[in-house]
Image (cartoon, helix red, strand yellow):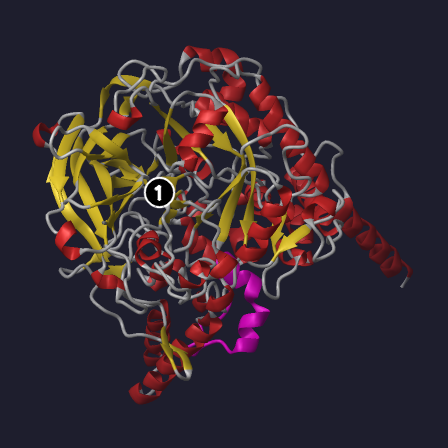
Amino acid sequence: MKRFAIALIVAIVAAGALLYAGAQGWLGRAPAAGQPTPPAPHTAGDAGTPIDAGPAAGRQILFGDLHVHTIYSTDANLMSLPMMQGDGPHPPADACDFARYCSRLDFWSINDHAEGLTPQRWESTREAIRQCNALTDPANPDLVSFLGYEWTQMSQLDAANHFGHKNVIFRDTAEGRVPLRPIAARNPGVSVAAFVPPLRQRLGMPLLDPRHLRSYLDFNRFGREMLDVPDCPDDVDTRELPADCREWAATPAELFRKLDESGLDSIVIPHGNTWGLYSAMNSTWDKQLAGAMHDPKRQFLVEVYSGHGNSEEYRPWRPAIATADGLRCPEPTADYLPVCWRAGEIVRERCLAEGTDAAACDTRAAETRQRAVDAGTGMEFGVVAGAQSADWLDAGQCRDCFLPAQNYRPGGATQYALAIGNFDEPGAPRRFRFGLMASSDVHSARPGTGYKEYARIPMTEARGPVSERALHAMQDYDGPKLARARTPEELAQERRAVLFQMMERQSSFFLTGGLVAVHADSRRREDIWAALARKEVYGTSGPRILLWFDLIDRAGGEARLPMGGEARIAENPRFRVRAAGAFEQKPGCPQDSIDALGAGRLEKLCLGECYYPGDTRHAITRIEVVRIRPQQTPGEDVSGLVEDPWRVLACEGGGEECTVEFEDEEFSAAGRETLYYVRAIQAPSPTVNADPLRCEKDADGVCLRADPCVGDYRTQGEDCLAPAQERAWSSPIFLDPV
């Protein structure tokens, strides 16, 4: 009995150490390297060469990443752990160095999740951004760094209360011109504790991997410090709140109100609205056009693409069908297999394999389909016990989209947002008039990862357990493969394991990140901000494609209005598109990056490869034009309003540059608002995770067997390359008839 008591005391002390210990310097503060680099070449000369582009004459194209996470984000911290194939903590200073010396960007912003930013971490973030900017010449900076955070809102079950994630970015960085604290999203039924792993995992990880004990102690401390921050009082002006509390906003309207109270210049950029990892099944953009839920003076850009996939394209199918009695599972179509339907088929197959009567198996399949719908986003895959990622085939996917987000939600697509209207008030309907941009959403402090397609695990979010032992400890691989649906009680009990299983499937869909490009008057902060504000921006899937899109004068051919512009015109519009492919990359890194970082740090941070352009460009094969005529009446079917592609214009000769013109002969006669944007398509090239499920298909394109490129030890060393047609998306030109 005495020995048992001693062992119990030792276990309690050890558990306390595992939960509460952590190195004093665990936040990973590190100085940024101390010298700027020459601007990276994007044009035929260099980034400082003016580009003649009609109304943008004298402007230059600059590339950036406005969606970057560091070790201060909870999920990024988890992905940094050795057990998850992480390569250690990367603080904001690493992001600064990566943007400057590895990806050679012109600008970037930091966007850690607000709920994880304790007062200490927010102070460290502000100082890191100022330090990064201090290394450059403000009159002609090699790199401009913006301060920001992510408002991470979600409701996985209730579409009416799901608004999605938004990045908040601030123009200024000086003390007094930045907020004292970030604003976190208050999610329905979710507290800060939900972002902290459960006790068994916090204790289990260091026990499974004692060689990296310090990493797990630091991770446990990270979670404990999050829980120690008190909530700010509600209904108090944001300027009157203390600096040491956590501020919340439950809806976009609350977020916009608090940003207005601050009096600070900021931009709010939605992202991830098609991601079926967290978006409620039938969530759409419509509710965000109502009243104060939209603020067009701050929310005028949308992230159309990131390392989490493409969110551009609208499709008419839905993951569930709304009825008077609630949601039910739709039947599969030629271009879509619902997750709920596939859940029923897996159970049916197991049931028949047991020798059960076919009619009884049909009943079980129907019950499973409904249970999957009722379980909601993130949990619908867990309704079938023991089902692995390959068992789901291509369920939930947009089969004909370009590199789509996993478990696609078409009601959140950018095209849908641009096509709808709000008719609650008299007069012209309210619209989203978004400029289109892209970024990375990287979680390893590596802005602009898409410059080369290599090192899939560290350069994307594709993470997973480092060993079979760790995999089985986190997920329900060892559980029974039931020939029935899990009950709601069983599903709740296995919630954590199911979420890890969902992340396993998600890991097959992570890509190297996109970029945002601006047509700016100079490299200065003020001019980059001004270009964002006038929506003279575009996005790319990673390569630095050059793109111009202008409304031109019909008579003389002079450019009248660049991308992002709005105008009222009487005649049929004519447009010009110019595009140039991205530079092909040389191996390795330029000498100034090697000199600045040193061989060891360059290998750890850049993984031995940098943005290093050669003299030739990839070919642009075609220009695709999308035309959208937004709703004129409530309930008008969006499917008939989005014309994608409306025109396809070939680039003759297969050269590095392409210039085409087109006209809309129907505009004047139609007499309705119309917007146009273009995609410049590059020739196919090898791309990480471009074929994420590696399906074996039949003659009709139906997936028969899948071999997902998961992010754990089973695909270690594989970059899972497949050909993809990289692209750039222009911001729209919005035209109203006179």
Whether 637 is drawn above or below 56: the answer is below
Q: Amino acid at mark 1?
A: Leu
- In this view, the residue in front, 158 or 330, is 158
In the rendered image, residue 173 lying in the magenta stretch gets the answer: no
Residue 341: name its quadrant: bottom left
Would residue 290 be seen by someone viewing this image from the given angle?
yes
- In this view, the residue in front, 433 or 444, is 433
- In this view, the residue in front, 2 or 725, is 725
Instruction: Give the residue at x 33% y 44%.
Output: 689
Instruction: Give the residue at x 30% y 53%.
Output: 415
Q: Name the residue beneath numbered marker 1.
A: 436
Residue 662: name its quadrant: top left
Residue 410: x %, y % from top left: 33, 60
Instruction: Give the residue at x 18% y 46%.
Output: 570
Whether 203 is drawn above or below 391: the answer is above
Disc 1 packing (10 Å; few <14; some 14–19; many ≥20): many
Q: At numbered mark 1, what does the secondary structure look like: helix, strand or loop?
A: strand
Going by the image, does 11 lie left or right of 280?
right
Quarter occupied by the N terminus: bottom right
Residue 380: x %, y % from top left: 44, 68
Q: Which residues are magenta?
A: 476-501
Going by the image, does 706 lie left or right of 478?
left
Would residue 28 be seen by someone viewing this image from the given angle?
no
